[in-house]
Image (cartoon, helix red, strand yellow):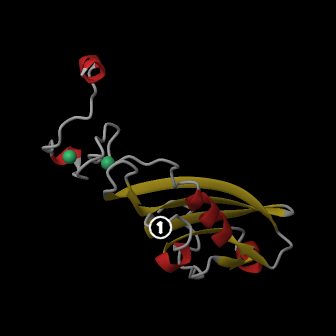
Amino acid sequence: MSSDNFYQEYEVPEDLRFRTQDILRNGGLNCSAKLAPKYFEAIFTPPNKITEVQVSLEFWPTGKEITVRGRVWGKRTVRCDRCLKETTQNFDENFLETASASAEIIDIMLLVRQTLALTEDIQFLCTPDCKGLCSQCGKNLNEGPCNCKPEILSPFAVLKGKFK
Ligand SMILES: [Zn+2]
Ligand SMILES: [Zn+2]
């Protein structure tokens, strides 16, 4: 065990609101916890969602402030913008913040939620070369071609129409 593994037994508050006194009294705090997904339901645009969240946190007092280093990781389910298939992926993010040592509570939930919000991509693709859905029959073209005729208009087709 390394010497910085002090206070591992600390029971992490479910809503991640830490009492500043608990941190100061021990000269710092290291802890980790698995969080209930209910706290993160509204962060992504449905059907995208966060399904699993874990945090590890390290607090250390620096005079008038307390510095917090956090890692948040887990799983998210996201829908491909082209083929609409939903896939589950891992995410793993870090944050670093300072809070006032004179505050009664340090609200880490806010930081975790902000960090998670940034993990939602504006455009998500299941694979970089996702073929998407056929615009005519709606078949997922990643699973193979469909029987629709391609919508390509050859220059000859246009000319043929003109001279008829
Ligand atoms: Zn796709
Ligand atoms: Zn088709």
Using the image as rendered, state which of residue 137 and residue 68 is in the foreground: 137
Can residue 81 be seen from the camera position used here?
Answer: yes
State the image quarter where residue 95 is shown: bottom right
Using the image as rendered, state which of residue 74 and residue 48 is in the foreground: 48
The percent coordinates of residue 145 (x first, y second) are 15, 42
Q: Secondary structure at mark 1?
A: loop
The answer to whether 44 appears left or right of 67 in the picture is left
Above/below status of 58 relative to 153: below
Q: Which residue corresponds to mark 1?
A: 46
The percent coordinates of residue 96 (x first, y second) are 67, 54
State the image quarter where residue 129 is shown: top left
The percent coordinates of residue 8 (x first, y second) are 54, 73
Residue located at (72% from left, 57% from top): 97
Kind of residue at disc 1: Pro
Above/below status of 21 relative to 96: below
Residue located at (31% from left, 57% from top): 85
State the image quarter where residue 105 is shown: bottom right
The percent coordinates of residue 13 (x first, y second) are 60, 82
Total number of numbered discs in the rendering:
1
Residue located at (28% from left, 40% from top): 131
Q: Residues within 10 Å of mark 1 (few under 14, many from 20)?
A: few
Tell me: is circle 1 under 8 Å from ligand 1: no
The answer to whether 86 appears left or right of 23 in the picture is left
Residue located at (71% from left, 79% from top): 22
Can residue 36 be seen from the camera position used here?
Answer: no
Q: Quadrant of the C terminus?
A: top left
Above/below status of 117 relative to 19: above
Using the image as rendered, state which of residue 4 and residue 135 is in the foreground: 135
